[in-house]
Image (cartoon, rainbow, N blue to C red):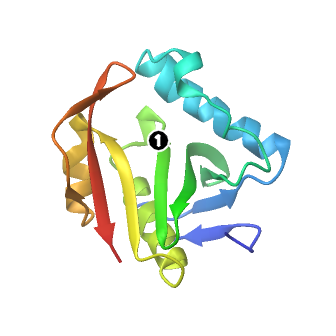
């Protein structure tokens, strides 16, 4: 878990990116608002499917808010299904901010931070963004499957 109040992430052209652990109700609410904008409004996933019991403080799930130059830009959460494994969930960047390296910078920062604690990252990626994760060093380990009515693939990255 992050012990810092935030983790600065620098990359070109996305300087000014900060990854902030959501350890207050206000930060968690900001994460959930970003997720709602992406998953519910943009992708049409019902909120009842997008949210679950892990979307609260103190559940063992680490939520993160991504900010670009002080503005909310994205969100994700990490769960720890077994020793040495970090599972990324609900990773999203607001649509008008995609394509600027923010997602890649966030993944690199998380992988660096958890490197001593985890030997593997895993996630269920929407099939349409599989190429993004492949470019970030992940590999596909499943056939396409449906989740919340959207095609997905399971991906992993050994650290």
Q: Which residue is mark 1?
A: 92
Q: Quadrant of residue 133?
A: bottom left
Count every numbered label the image shows and give the total. Answer: 1
Left or right of 20, for residue 99: left
Residue 12 appearing in the image: no
Front residue of this view, candidates 82 and 119: 82
Locate the C terminus and report the quarter of the image it occupies: bottom left
- 90 in relation to 109, above or below: above
Query: In the current view of this chain or complex, which residue is farthest to the left?
Result: 143
Residue 53 point in image, percent of width and height: 68, 34
Side of 83 where 101 appears, left or right:
left
Residue 69 at x, y percent in the picture:
61, 55
Q: Name the image quarter holding residue 145.
A: top left
Residue farthest to the bottom, as pictured:
116
Residue at (48%, 28%) from the top-left corner?
Answer: 38
| Other-residue count near label 1 (Cα within 10 Å), few / some / many at <14 / 14–19 / ≥20 | many
Q: Residue at x 38, y 57 (%)?
A: 122
**Which quarter of the figure is the N terminus placed in?**
bottom right
Closer to us: 96 or 45: 45
Residue 74 vertical placement versus 116 (above, below): above
Q: Secondary structure at mark 1?
A: strand
Q: Which residue is found at the position 73% from the left and 48% from the top?
A: 59
């Amino acid at each position: 878990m992050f012990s810092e109040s935030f983790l600065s992430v620098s990359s070109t052209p996305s300087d000014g990116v900060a990854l902030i652990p959501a350890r207050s109700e206000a930060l968690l609410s900001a994460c959930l608002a970003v997720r709602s904008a992406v998953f519910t409004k943009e992708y049409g996933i019902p909120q009842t499917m997008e949210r679950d019991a892990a979307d609260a403080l103190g559940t063992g799930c680490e939520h993160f808010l991504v900010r670009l130059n002080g503005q909310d830009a994205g969100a994700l959460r990490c769960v720890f299904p077994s020793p040495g494994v970090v599972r990324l969930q609900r990773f999203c960047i607001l649509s008008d901010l995609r394509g600027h390296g923010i997602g890649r910078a966030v993944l690199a920062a998380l992988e660096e931070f958890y490197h001593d604690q985890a030997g593997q990252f895993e996630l269920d990626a929407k099939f349409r963004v599989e190429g993004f994760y492949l470019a970030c060093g992940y590999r596909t380990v499943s056939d396409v499957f449906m989740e919340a009515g959207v095609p997905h693939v399971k991906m992993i990255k050994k650290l």
